[in-house]
Image (cartoon, rainbow, N blue to C red):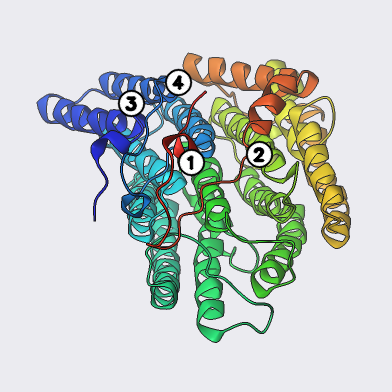
Amino acid sequence: MTAPLSGLPPSLPILGGGIALLMLSIAWRRSEARAIVIALATLFLAFASLWSPVLSWPGDPVGILFVPDGWFAYIAGLILLSSAACAIMAWREAGTPADEFYLLLLLGTLGALVMAGSVDMVIFFLGLETLSLSLLGLIAYHRIQPTADEAAIKYLILAGLSSAILLFGLALSYAESGSLRFAAPSLAGPDGPALPLAATALVLTGLFFKLSAVPFHTWLPDVMEGAPIPVASFIAVTSKIALFAALARYFAGADLLRPDAAGMELAIIAVLSMFGGNLLALGQTNLKRLLAGSSIAHVGYLLLALLSPGPFGLASAAFYLAAYAAATSGAFAAMRGASGLSDIAGWRGMFRRRPALALAMAVMLISLAGIPPAIGFFAKTYIVIAGVSARRVVLLVALVASSIIGLYYYLNVVRAMMEPVPEDHRAVRGTQANTVLITALAIVTLLAGLFPEMLVRQTRALLQPLPVLRAASLPPIAPHDILYSE
């Protein structure tokens, strides 16, 4: 069962064409400069195509495998911009030879986009595995770096395990519904039928492994520490955005306010991730591991938004994803601008050594901590409003308490940068392109926090329910129900 090509958003064929062009370029003559130009041109052209004329699905909705709706368009924009930031960070950092690095980056981005828009189990799984296999190659790309091999092996084992669990859950879901629609099976309550209950639990377990939510998080700090900085950013930002978008689409037709098993599991994982991620980051001396813990905690905050359906739930999650992407990408870019310094001790005295770089890093950290005037403050406030509207009292208390814990380790890095310059410090430098990236992300993080109205309007436009496509008995869907537009 296939969908017509006319139903695909233009960004997917553009990415496929860019990948083919980059492969031909590598076969002709190796050149990192040409490779990054092709990669960035492909990503920005795909981003521009999100505003192309509306594409609709003709025919019966049974044949729909991919829904390019407003949710996909918004998430695709974040994914493409985050991947472009990773590509800029990788300039003269990817390794030798560097051409295949950008090829793997484009392949991973393609997999992330497929995940974000798929409503079919098979298509979703193909996108997930495309992303996972690309990440495996990216993590191990530095052949002379022993930690990269170790990180890649850990990722390979746990990614394979989580994919097997997820696939088993999807098989049980198909056995229950007789449909390949990527949607949570209906549960009657906490003691609902065993088969849909097991299917949902296994699918969530597989997705939580990929999202590194607590207690499935233990692989993330080791993998991010061993991976190159651009790849660590890709794992923490691009893959997390795609996975959360898929999770939101999986529960598009479920009533998460109802006290059933899936809602309880999501709530428990949300609380564990908020506290577990912040406590994990609390004692870290390595910035990559600290940002890994931060990433886990932010998954918990996003789950609170997902569990707060209503006038603010999906909109607050979308806003938070943008804030998280800008601040986390900026933090990794600042690390790359400091010659890859990942030990917090190496950042001592940075306000005196590189004041502009230290200021940019401070902006990213206060945004992640949720301190005004950065965008992170408004993003976290938006999620609190969503939680209050849904009366998620326990989750709100967990968010506030865990955020207080997070203040310590974020501000501890800022404090270290304000210390006197150590005698054994070494010079730090970055590429001009990376400096432009850091500056742009710092400006966006501040201005979007001071003037969030435009982004709020964009996210409020996503309040229409995501398309729910379950069984073959559905009536035909009108084109305007499954379109994406500006």
Q: Classify 10 Å Cα crowding around label 1: few (below 14), some (14-19), many (20 and above).
A: many
Q: Secondary structure at mark 1?
A: helix
Q: Classify 10 Å Cα crowding around label 2: few (below 14), some (14-19), many (20 and above).
A: some
Three-letter amino acid code at the position of disc 2? Leu
Residue 243 place in picture, x, y as percent: 51, 51
- CA gap, disc 4 to disc 1? 24 Å
Question: Residue 443 occupies which quadrant of the picture?
Answer: top right
Closest to the observer: 16 or 430? Answer: 16
Q: Is residue 256 left or right of residue 430?
A: right
User: Can you tell which of label 4 and label 3 is closer to the viewer?
Assistant: 4
Residue at x 43% of width, y 57% of height? 474
What residue is shown with label 3? 39
Residue at x 37% of width, y 62% of height? 472
Q: Earlier in the sequence, mark 4 or mark 2?
A: 4
What residue is shown with label 4? 51
- CA gap, disc 4 to disc 3? 20 Å
